Image (spheres, grey):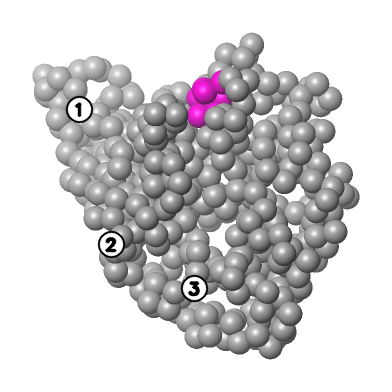
Amino acid sequence: MDYQTPLSFLLFIFSLLFLLLQATPEDVFVGVNIGTELSVMPHPTQVAALLKAQQIRHVRLYDADGGMLMALANTGIQVMVTIPNEQILGIGQSNSTAANWVNRNVLAHYPATNITAISVGFDVLTTLPNAAKILVNALKYVHSALVASNLDHQIKVSTPLSSSIILDSFPPSQAFFNASLDSVIVPLLGFLQSTNSFLMLNVYPYYDYMQSDGFILLDYALLKPLPSNKEAVDSNTLLRYTNVFDAMIDAAYFAMASLNFTNIPIVVSETGWPSKGGSNEPDATLENANTYNSNLIRHVLNKTGTPKHPGIAISTYIYELYNEDLKPGPISERNWGLFDANGKPVYILRLTGSGLVLANDTTNQTYCAAKEGVDPRMLQAALDWACGPGRVDCSALLQGQPCYEPDNVMAHATYAFNTYYLQMGKASGSCDFNGVAAVTTTNPSHGSCSFSGR
């Protein structure tokens, strides 16, 4: 293997083309919810800095705080703002009130702040039933205000629904919405379809598991790999389910189909797992929270889709960025966050194969490693490129040198990829190599071969 570094202009062009090939348009994302019930809420500029450091490009706010929207200006971060539940009654009864809200909380910040969606309330149907009858009016009035400003294509309007309103959710093919809510659900779905918006669904496998009386396996809730005999099978469709998350998404698809709505996309507006709980919450642990969120991020970004709609990825907002220590209720309610109020990670996500998003080791110890199971010929080609046009010094891989052993393409490629990744300043797209590499927080050092994560 020739590890010399060519300097010709032709190879420079090849290098540029290789990087361009790695860049793919974003069509699925993992974002975070940002709650504010903290005794010491970080300043909006600190929040924005944490988001940028973590490569988080999508956030959902539970309000439309002006300071936060100003801090997010010119960051490129896509923002979903929320009309609080207590304002829905006013907005749902007055077109002008809705227009004023949009003018004050959206138009005043757009386009510097990249507002892409408006959430009208949260869990309105289950937490504010007296507002249910005017919920769809509120969505329509807000949308009309966007139309008047010619922003209805750039900014979508929806409202989050609890998955608890979907009854008989397994098998998914039998799922249906609570019939007592049909007078709201049907016009709501009609609105979403006519405006090319999306259904927002809160999906919490943790609660499904806790309330199942042992019927749901912990591994099935945590998106862990299951042996085939542990998979859940829909007896009507024969679709096989390996996790609660996919089953709930498909239940929503089937519930919409039962009302003759078949082309409304789903965005998961909340999901997560608590890292700490009381004595009656034994599975709210750091390990389980890490496992769920790490597996979830990989599952979403790998564009796996669901058994009903394979390959149709479900963009997802994790609940949540910070532990909210002022939340009432059981201990777990205050421990859903990925970070504490100081921006310190509650746990380090295990994200090999998921790129830079939420590689939440704030010491910036991230590495670039070859993916397991990829075509060895593609791996070899990427290794050759890194040690040639990529201008990586691969002398440490020669026989007798510290990183020669183990003498295989996986180990050698990981060394070359990580070196290139560092040389490029860990820039976005510098750890992909046509899909055979990924960012990880796991140090791949071995024996005498030491890797740097800085």
Residue, disc 3: 64
Q: Which residue is mark 1?
A: 445
Between 444 and 105, the residue placed more toward the observer is: 105
Q: Answer with left or right where residue 60 lies relative to residue 136.
A: left
CA distance separating discs 1 and 2:
39 Å
Residue 212 percent location from the top left of the image: 62, 26
For mark 3, give the secondary structure. loop
Q: Earlier in the sequence, mark 1 or mark 2?
A: 2
Q: Name the residue: 46% across, 34% down.
A: 292
What residue occupies the far top of the structure in this picture?
Answer: 229
Whether residue 276 appears in this view of the structure is yes
Amino acid tagged 1: Ser
Q: Give how far apart the Cα atoms at labels 2 and 3 are.
A: 19 Å
**Left or right position of 171 against 61:** right
Look at the image and say whether residue 23 sits in the magenta stretch. no
Residue at the (44%, 29%) spot, across then down: 280
Q: Position of residue 38 (x, y in %)?
A: 34, 59
Element class at badge 2: loop
In front of the other: 354 or 82? 82
Q: CA distance from mark 3 to mark 1?
A: 45 Å
Amino acid type, residue under disc 3 in the picture: Ala
| Residue 347, image quadrant | top left
Q: Is the Cβ of the residue at disc 1 closer than 8 Å to that at disc 2?
A: no
State the extent of the magenta-drawn residues as a range. Answer: 216-224
Q: Which residue is mark 2?
A: 40
Three-letter amino acid code of the residue under disc 2? Val
Q: Nearer the viewer, mark 2 or mark 3?
A: 2
* Residue drawn at 60 percent across, 43 percent down: 203
Q: Position of residue 17 (x, y in %)?
A: 42, 53
Instruction: Classify residue 44 as left or right of residue 247.
Output: left
